[in-house]
Image (spheres, helix red, strand yellow):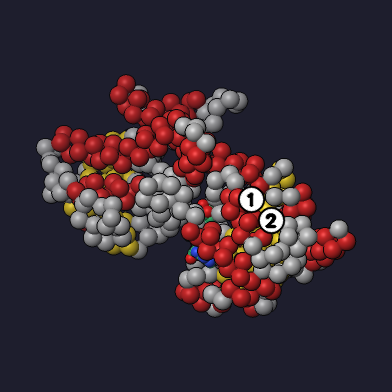
Amino acid sequence: MKQQSNIKLVLENLIKEKKATIGVIGLGYVGLPLITEFCSKGFRGIGFEVDPKKVESINSGKSYIVDVPTEKVKSCVAEKRLSATCDFSSLKECDAIIICVPTPLRKTKDPDMSYILAAGEEIKKHARSGQLIILESTTYPGTTDEVLLPMIEETGLKLDEDFFLAFSPERVDPGNPQFQTHNIPKVVGGVSKDSTQIAALLYSQIVEKVYPVSSARVAEAAKLWENTFRAINIGMANEMAKLCRTLGIDTWEVVKAAATKPFGFMPFYPGPGIGGHCIPLDPHYLSWKARQHGFDSKFITLAEEINSSMPKYVVELVRDALNDEQKPLKGSKILILGVAYKKDIDDMRESPALSVIDLLRARGAEVFYHDPFVPEVTFDHAYTIGDGEPLYNQELTDELIKSADCVVICTDHSCIDYKRICELASVIVDTRNALSEEIRNGSKAKIIRL
Ligand SMILES: NC(=O)c1ccc[n+]([C@@H]2O[C@H](COP(=O)([O-])OP(=O)(O)OC[C@H]3O[C@@H](n4cnc5c(N)ncnc54)[C@H](O)[C@@H]3O)[C@@H](O)[C@H]2O)c1
């Protein structure tokens, strides 16, 4: 008992005095903003990465994540508060270790736990008494206490006597200038009471509001509930878009009108499909776990079905628009505007634009794209039905826009001059409501909106 309270006390003091060394495993969209936040609040941070290029970039003071300014990384490195390494033996130096590795799906759409297991193995090799370990990667309820806890206990170290373990979901919204790490409330659930307390204390050093819950499972489930809520509501918006189109009603005007209700309604918008590392994947983590217990989550299945039908629906809109011009899809020149999965970011993971391009190419269209954030688009040959050859960003010249038989707005980046597109293009399919009423009214182009 004496040893337990000592370790807890020592760790608490290290955190309060900002003398704790924070290790972050995985320096991607989640890990890099997190570690730089700790470092700029005065902590020493060590980033652990398997990608040597990222390690090199950080150590030379350069950011590769749009939301993390290079200036911030540079000053943290210059003040010797931030470093990155591929050598996991330095995990021993860390008082707190936060795991931010990917949690993708296997081809079977089951959770791919290999990254969490690899991080767990490294912690197991280098763990010492007196550490706080936190998992931030999105995962199914039960991962922290069913998978990580036994792994760490295999070292002989004991929960609450030697180490503390918690789950705290990451809610970062890449490209959102209003909400960043420091002002997004942080849910924290430990596998023990002490674990919750210490993890909450750690996060309270860098975020304005920490919300402790009774267990790691609650925290894990809360994250999946949030993202399942989004996937299902986007699925509904996509279905409403198809429904409104069938009835000849303007979807965007309907949702704008409905959103004037000050309570009981939250607007979600249709689009060419869902993308990113979270919304298309996370609900599967929940439904997979539910299935292990004989529960079939119907909403998740339905939303997935509707959302994944959207790229094909967009291609049908393009086909119909060209048909009205007496042009076949085969051989037509299609310019895709925006390929990142959402506006103003460079993230291509699960981007629905990839499926739109792939389907168009499979039907014989000649596809070009312009996206100032994405220099090159590659296709996973295991999934492509088109030719699968990489594509490169094209300069958005007047000639390019004019030469396209159809322009498809897949991502509504703010830096695109949509008025110019409307002046020069002949046929436009707008999947994001990027073209305002004013721009549309002044245009001679044939415009089809979702
Ligand atoms: N991107 C988001 O917007 C977001 C938001 C909330 C939650 N999440 C969740 O956070 C987790 C991380 O997502 P991300 O977007 O930062 O992924 P990412 O791919 O951008 O970054 C993960 C990093 O981990 C590194 N990595 C992989 N295996 C490693 C290992 N064994 N040791 C050390 N580093 C390793 C990769 O090289 C990569 O740099 C995922 O579970 C994701 O679902 C992401």
Give x and y (percent) for residue 45: 66, 70
Image vertical order of residue 239 relative to residue 201, above or below? above
Mark 1 — residue? Answer: 145
The label shown at residue 259 is: none
Q: Residues within 10 Å of mark 1 (few under 14, many from 20)?
A: some
Look at the numbered disc 1 and give the secondary structure of its residue: helix
Residue 58 appearing in the image = yes
Relative horizontal placement of residue 11, taking residue 71 as reference (left or right) = right
Image quarter for residue 96? bottom right
Residue sitting at the far top: 247
Residue drawn 68% across the image and 77% down it: 79
CB atoms of marks 2 and 1 within 8 Å? yes
Amino acid type, callout 1 = Asp
Relative horizontal placement of residue 355, taking residue 128 as reference (left or right) = left
Of callouts 2 and 1, the N-terminal one: 1
Pick whichever, 312 or 296, lies toward us. Answer: 296
Give x and y (percent) for residue 181: 63, 54
Image quarter for residue 438? top left
Between disc 2 and disc 1, the foreground one is 1
Image quarter for residue 214? top right
Pick whichever, 17 or 264, lies toward us. Answer: 17
Relative horizontal placement of residue 399, taking residue 258 as reference (left or right) = left
Quadrant where the C terminus lies? top left
Give x and y (percent) for residue 344: 45, 53
Amino acid type, callout 2 = Leu
Residue 176 appearing in the image = no
Image vertical order of residue 234 relative to residue 124, above or below? above
Pick whichever, 110 or 270, lies toward us. Answer: 110
Pick whichever, 414 or 85, lies toward us. Answer: 85
Mark 2 — residue? Answer: 165
Residue drawn 39% across the image and 55% down it: 348
